[in-house]
């Protein structure tokens, strides 16, 4: 096995036992990116010199008898909507094509403190608005399992990078499924943490009450490791909460005895692919065998998930994206005749079609005459969605659910009508609406060999149980250790 | 429900966006808005009588920190991404011109 193919845990062992130096690990990763990323397009920018310099610095510390921090020597890829000091952070938008933040996001400070080495920034749907990474202003990212298909989105670059061994670890962000859906499509593990447990300071906002940064990894153990580093309260984020620190190690033992797992009957309704149904049945058998008990629950508002999500997220986006005016940073249109003309030209030329559509929709649902019918109504249904989950969690510790209704689609297949793509988010958006944690773990494959991921959804701060069950699914599922041929 | 071109133009103005100029592109945008709003209209079926809205999912409290002096970003750092600057300030077109020319919102 090549160094670049290894999990973070395996790389740590290799470094500790001196089978390879940190510069060798990083060099192997950079060479892999150079040879293989042109086929995938996972990265928007890479930082080979900075990464090698950091690797050498850490190696010297190691050779002088020092110990490495938790992620010492491990390469990591970062979604391009997370601010990295003096490293290009574009949000895959023409609007921020040249933006170099003067500060690090809190998660980046934590990663640097933990010794992780940033090798590059990954492609995404512009401003995280999309489910296929086709809305990037720069280039497409291909699914490493079938390069004619999308990797999912909006964190498609991060998911594809981990799947194609272009990084063992990556960060993404999830507003309505943007970590879990690409993780499922690319056959990797992705966690959308409980709202508030990972600081959003330095995450370029899409919809602030829904956005959450989270980890991607090749397996559940690595995912828990990365979550343990990035989570925790942050005085720079007023929505940051964490009642107790996440215990990474106590939970990966393959034991789910006594756990009650709910299956929502509404999630098994029409529109779920055969492969997803089969994967669910398989997962249920695996978890039952490992000692879990299944109960039927009901989430009667499932049909409203997608409209509630699009109303709230677009409304918040229309407000958040008001800051892009061509004045302080980013793109500025030329030949403006007045300040207002500068705003309008900059925004019309700087934002792509999907972003403009969502700003228009968000402005519409917040505008006088429509606020009550759409925005306030969506917030009321949000209350009911939260109550539905709360009722379900009186009967069980977590839910088992599909991550996506279907397998990854071909490029362009769902581009004719934006709503076709929105409807693919039905199983992921509700956890964001209710602020709950969800993890997608690869379990099986469809008829053509594409990975199928399933989702475990927990009550707020229920990550430890989610990892426990996800670990069992991974160990007994069909996908452990599989790598795409590239 | 179809949004009229006038309504769309009003919303675009609020959002500081320019509508496409040719009729075909405008119609495409109106079609897309129509299908999204039809999706949103499904919510009318949900019974929300006496249900309080939820803007935020967590019971949030103020986050306090110690009142300590810390370094902040320098003027140079704050201006490093400015498309245009002059004398340590962001340079912009005139914000106040002849009052008669200013559009009123």
Image (spheres, rainbow, N blue to C red):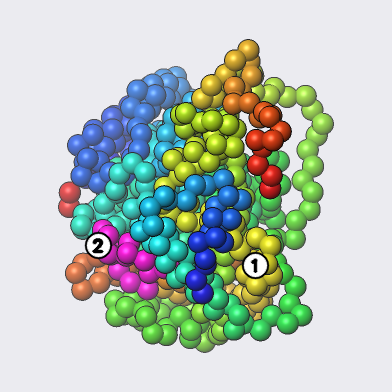
Kindly indicate whether the residues beneath marks 1 and 2 are on one polypeptide chain.
Answer: yes
Can residue A158 be seen here? The reply is no
User: Where on the picture, by quarter, is residue A396?
Assistant: bottom right
Give the farthest residue toward the top: B87
Instruction: Name above or below for residue A241 compared with residue A414.
Output: above
Q: From mark 1 to mark 2, how far is it between C-alphas?
A: 36 Å
Q: Nearer the viewer, residue A82 or B104?
A: B104
Instruction: Name above or below for residue A93 compared with residue A402.
Output: above
Q: Nearer the viewer, mark 1 or mark 2?
A: 1
Q: Nearer the viewer, residue A147 or A275?
A: A147
Residue A401 on image: x %, y %: 45, 74
Label 1 resides on the chain identified as A
Residue that carries the numbered disc 1 in the rendered image: A370
Residue A206 on image: x %, y %: 54, 50
Who's the residue at 17% across and 49% down the image?
A486
Q: Secondary structure at mark 2?
A: loop
Residue A402 on image: x %, y %: 41, 73
Label 2 resides on the chain identified as A
Let me know if residue A408 is in the magenta part: yes
Let me know if residue A340 is in the magenta part: no
Who's the residue at 39% across and 24% down the image?
A50
Q: Is residue A165 left or right of residue B86?
A: left
Can residue A149 be seen here? The reply is yes
Residue that carries the numbered disc 2 in the rendered image: A410
Residue A385 on image: x %, y %: 62, 75
Which secondary structure class fits the magenta region best?
A: loop
Report crowding for label 1: few under 14, some 14 to 19, many 20 or more residues within 10 A (C-alpha). Answer: some
Specify start and end residues of the magenta stretch as a single range: A403-422
């Amino acid at each position: 096995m090549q160094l670049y193919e290894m999990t973070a845990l395996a790389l740590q062992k290799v470094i500790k036992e001196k089978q390879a130096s940190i510069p060798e690990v990083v060099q192997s990763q950079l060479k892999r990116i150079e040879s293989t990323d042109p086929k995938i397009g996972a990265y928007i920018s890479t930082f080979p010199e900075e990464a090698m310099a950091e690797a050498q610095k850490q190696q010297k510390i190691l050779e002088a008898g020092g110990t490495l921090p938790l992620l010492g020597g491990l390469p990591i890829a970062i979604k391009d909507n997370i601010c990295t000091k003096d490293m290009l952070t574009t949000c895959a938008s023409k609007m921020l094509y040249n933006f170099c933040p003067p500060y690090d996001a809190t998660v980046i400070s934590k990663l640097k403190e933990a010794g992780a080495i940033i090798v590059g920034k990954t492609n995404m749907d512009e401003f995280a608005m999309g489910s296929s990474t086709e809305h990037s202003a720069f280039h497409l990212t291909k699914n490493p399992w079938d390069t004619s298909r999308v990797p999912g989105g909006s964190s498609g670059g991060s998911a594809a990078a981990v799947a194609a061994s272009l990084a063992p670890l990556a960060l993404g962000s999830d507003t309505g499924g943007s970590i879990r859906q690409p993780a499922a499509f690319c056959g990797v593990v992705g966690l959308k943490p409980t709202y508030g447990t990972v600081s959003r300071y330095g995450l370029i906002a899409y919809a602030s009450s829904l956005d959450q940064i989270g980890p991607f990894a090749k397996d559940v153990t690595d995912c828990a490791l990365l979550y343990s580093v990035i989570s925790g309260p942050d005085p720079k984020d007023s929505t940051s909460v964490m009642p107790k620190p996440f215990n990474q190690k106590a939970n990966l033992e393959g034991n789910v005895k006594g756990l009650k797992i709910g299956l929502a009957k509404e999630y098994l309704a029409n529109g779920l692919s055969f492969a997803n149904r089969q994967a669910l049945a398989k997962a249920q058998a695996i978890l039952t065998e490992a000692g879990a008990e299944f109960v039927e629950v009901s989430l009667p508002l499932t049909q409203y998930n997608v409209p509630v999500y699009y109303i709230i997220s677009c409304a918040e986006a229309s407000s958040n994206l008001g800051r892009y005016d061509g004045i302080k940073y980013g793109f500025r249109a030329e030949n403006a005749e007045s300040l207002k003309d500068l705003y309008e030209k900059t925004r019309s030329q700087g934002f792509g079609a999907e972003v403009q559509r969502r700003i228009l929709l968000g402005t519409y649902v917040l505008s006088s005459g429509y606020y009550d019918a759409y925005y306030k109504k969506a917030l009321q249904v949000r209350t009911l969605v939260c109550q539905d989950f709360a009722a379900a969690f009186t009967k069980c510790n977590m839910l088992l659910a599909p991550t996506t209704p279907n397998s990854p689609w071909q490029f362009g297949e769902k581009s004719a009508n934006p709503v076709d793509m929105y409807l693919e988010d039905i199983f992921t958006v509700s956890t964001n609406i209710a602020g709950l944690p969800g993890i997608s773990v690869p379990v099986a494959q469809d008829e053509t060999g594409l990975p199928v991921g399933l989702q475990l959804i927990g009550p707020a701060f229920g990550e430890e149980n989610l990892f426990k069950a996800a670990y069992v699914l991974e160990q007994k599922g069909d996908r452990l250790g599989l790598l795409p041929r590239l | 429900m179809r949004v009229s071109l006038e309504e769309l133009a009003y919303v675009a103005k609020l959002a500081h966006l320019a509508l496409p100029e040719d009729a075909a592109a405008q119609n495409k945008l109106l079609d897309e808005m129509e299908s999204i709003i039809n999706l949103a209209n499904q919510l009318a079926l949900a019974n929300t009588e006496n249900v309080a809205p939820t803007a935020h999912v967590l019971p949030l409290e103020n986050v306090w920190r110690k009142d300590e002096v810390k370094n902040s970003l320098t003027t140079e750092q704050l201006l490093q991404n400015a498309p245009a600057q002059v004398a340590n300030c962001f340079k912009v077109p005139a914000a106040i011109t002849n009052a008669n020319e200013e559009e009123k919102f």
